[in-house]
Image (tube, rainbow, N blue to C red):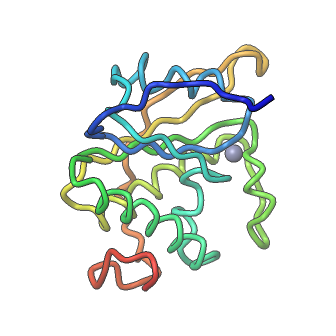
Amino acid sequence: MNFRKTFRVIQNPNPEVLIVTCFDPRFEEAMDAFPYEVLHLKKGAFILTKPGGGPTPLAYPVKTPSRCKAAAKQIMFTCNKFPSIVEVVLVSHGGKCGYYSTIPHHYYEDGMEEDDLSLGGSLMQIILPKHRINLYNAALINGGRETEFRRVPISQEILTPPFDWKKSYQLSH
Ligand SMILES: [Zn+2]
């Protein structure tokens, strides 16, 4: 028989917050709750995206410029598509993100995701100066059985975006 199941469609959503995190399923339960219990948002008030590695490519504009550019442009595209977005929240996670093994000549050190998040936040603040940029790391605690969200400050270090970010918001450029 034909399968059918009906769900409500959110009418005229007005997302105010874009959340970018990693697809790592270890953090699925935490990330499902994050928009509601940490940011206190309602359904339709946010867009949550989970590319592999989450915001980590933003911290590597020199080592992996094309990935950094792709990640930044996806965020720019979303903010352009939804002018109601005023805040971008980047969320990294502990426990060695699998993305790190894909960065050439990269050596993972425990806890480095917080520094990378801080750098990535700095890059996004340069690219999107009118948006609020907020950073959280989902750290592993209790022997890896639980995760705890911690605010991370934006780095004072200035990264140079690996593309002409002022020129265009189009993904194809
Ligand atoms: Zn990850």
The residue drawn where x is 55% and y is 43% is 21
User: Which x, y percent locates residue 127?
Assistant: 31, 67
Taking the image as shown, residue 92 lies to the left or right of residue 40, namely: right
Relative height, residue 45 to residue 121 (above, below): above
Taking the image as shown, residue 126 lies to the left or right of residue 157, namely: left
Relative height, residue 94 to residue 167 (above, below): above
Relative height, residue 173 to residue 85 (above, below): below
In the image shown, does 41 or 151 lie closer to the viewer? 41
Taking the image as shown, residue 101 lies to the left or right of residue 156, namely: right
Relative height, residue 97 to residue 34 (above, below): below
The residue drawn where x is 58% and y is 79% is 66
User: Which x, y percent locates residue 9?
Assistant: 41, 31
| Quarter that holds the C terminus | bottom left
In the image shown, does 59 or 38 lie closer to the viewer? 38
The residue drawn where x is 32% and y is 47% is 133
Taking the image as shown, residue 29 lies to the left or right of residue 131, namely: right
Residue 107: name its quadrant: bottom right
Q: Residue furthest left?
A: 130
User: Which x, y percent locates residue 99?
Assistant: 73, 55
Query: Which quarter holds ligand 1?
Result: top right
The residue drawn where x is 65% and y is 52% is 53
Residue 160: name its quadrant: bottom left
Image mark count: 0
| Quarter that holds the N terminus | top right
